[in-house]
Amino acid sequence: MSHLEDTIRHLHPDDTGVIPGKSEKAPSRRLTASSDSALDIQHGTVLGSEVHAGLQRRLGNRQIQLVAIGGSIGTALFVTIGDALRKSGPGSLLLAFSVYNVMLALVNNCMAEMSTYMPVSGGFIYLASKWVDDAVGFMVGWNFFLYEAIMIPFEITAITLVLSFWRNDIPPAAVCIACIVIYACLNVLVVKGYGESEFWLSGGKVILIFILFAFTFVTMVGGNPQNDAFGFRHWRHPGPFAEYLHSGDLGRFEGFLAALWTASYTCVGPEYISMVAAEAKHPRIYIKNAFKTAYWRFGVFFVGSALCCGVLVAYNDPTLVAVYTGESDGAGSAAASPYVIAMDNIGVGVLPHIVSALLVTTIFSAGNTYTYCATRSLYGLSVDGKAPKFLSKCTKGGVPIRCVAVVMAFPFLSFLQLSSSSSQVLTWLINLLTAAAIIDYIVMCLTYIWFYRACKTQGFDRSKLPYRGWFQPWSAIIGLLWMAMVVTCYGYTSFTPWDVTTFFTHYTMLLFGLITFASWKLIKRTRLLRPDEVDLTWDAPHITAYEEAAKINDPPIGFWTELILPFRSGRKNAPGQSEPTV
């Protein structure tokens, strides 16, 4: 018997888990003190006792925080945002990013409460199946899997373009093959190995962001080769709001919409924290911390980047316009980044190379995270019976090896750039993926509404949850309505004039979602659960038992304490020396 099993039995010989108060109407399930259940708890597999060699809880606090950053910060924040600036102007860009991140915070608020209480494998996908309708879980599961899997060739294509900043004779095929091999190697490592690699790669993103923020501030107050304290000059001339597609107020509004659609693709986050919840050492502590710090990421990283881009470059800058209208090479590459354009404009010679080098690690890190999330979502679908069962096999290290093999077929789509221009391939993928991301958020809000209704009906006391969301249920309702509006309207340009290709690149994932939902509903005869049917107890006793045992055997460590541990060779924190939370 393992030490963890013995601790669990000692803590809960008869009944495991202390869960929030509920009425007798709530379905319940008790955890038996069998070795099978203990094995499930130790491995972090909370989808059922029939699966034993499953995912393992090995991700620490610092790894989860940086994995969340790794998934939420990618090419769009540094490069694609330039096209939004050209179409909208600095004022509309800042306004659009601010509004969208407020709405994304509402979604994060919903997901934090559910995922912290029930950190299960498959994340929000399995919660939707269990608490709303199995057909909803099937639809969003495959939607999220395809979203993550298709993001991998997107990032590989972007790496090829960034490398062209230095030279144009680098074979794209060589870049594709190298990325595929490295992603495969990193993702067949044990979970801890993946978390460690992503920790260092994501650290480079944070460094890059603060370098660019510092560059913006220093140059705008006059710290540049031209000694020009330009400040907010571009907000005055040519102005804060650009006209797009039409002139006048309508054109300025369409410019704002263009920035809003870019924000809906650029700003992400809650889904990645939810997906790693089942592999966190102390999910109800570390996952809660990750969700809480997400609000800072939304404000600092996303809104801050929109402000910096509008300060550094005018929306009618000749280089910016030429790059994105096809009059110059570099669309989608580092040369198209507003930051690199600004550095060239003011005569900074070395920094563009540093930024471009960090962009390579940033984009590579994002692709690594997408590979991880795609394999875990496919694994969750397999365990839940929504994908072939043979895919649920894991290695002794807790890696769903067959899911990794399937996912590694998708990066080969990056070879499309050999026959079409890389920027064209990126445009196709962005249009497809924007809807997929928003569909995930719609399902998160919908799941929370069902969860909230069930809590009310069953007398479930939400105040005793590890994290209680604020402004509920209005946070979920407003988030749902907003995301539904965005996913419906973001492809409106395909109607004026009508363009079949543009329509399908924008709405393919929406149509796919409707087809998968209807198909599973008809085949399995599923229905929406009533509030009194929702199982709010579910695996809470398992998770609580694991948490209490883990606190004794491996106490939680604060983020900053864990951050410096790799640099303290030969030393380990004693249980009494560990910080409980951040």
Image (cartoon, rainbow, N blue to C red):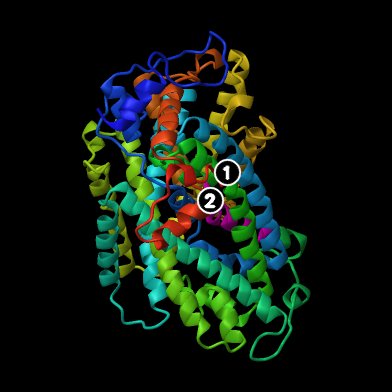
Of 225 and 259, nearer the camera is 225
Of 302 and 322, nearer the camera is 302
Q: Residue furthest top?
A: 24
Tell me if residue 263 is in the magenta stretch.
Answer: yes
Would residue 133 be counted in the magenta stretch? no
| SS at badge 1 | helix
Residue picked out by circle 2: 268
Whether residue 166 is situated above or below residue 131 in the rendered picture:
below
Q: Position of residue 106 (x, y in %)?
A: 63, 41
The residue under the point 28% across, 76% down is 171
| Residue 230 in view here | yes
In the image, what residue occupies the spot 58% across and 28% down? 465
Q: Which residue is mark 1?
A: 488
Amino acid at pointer 1: Thr
Q: Position of residue 92 (x, y in %)?
A: 70, 61
Give the alpha-carbon distance from disc 1 to disc 2, as whole Å: 18 Å
Residue 79 visible here: no
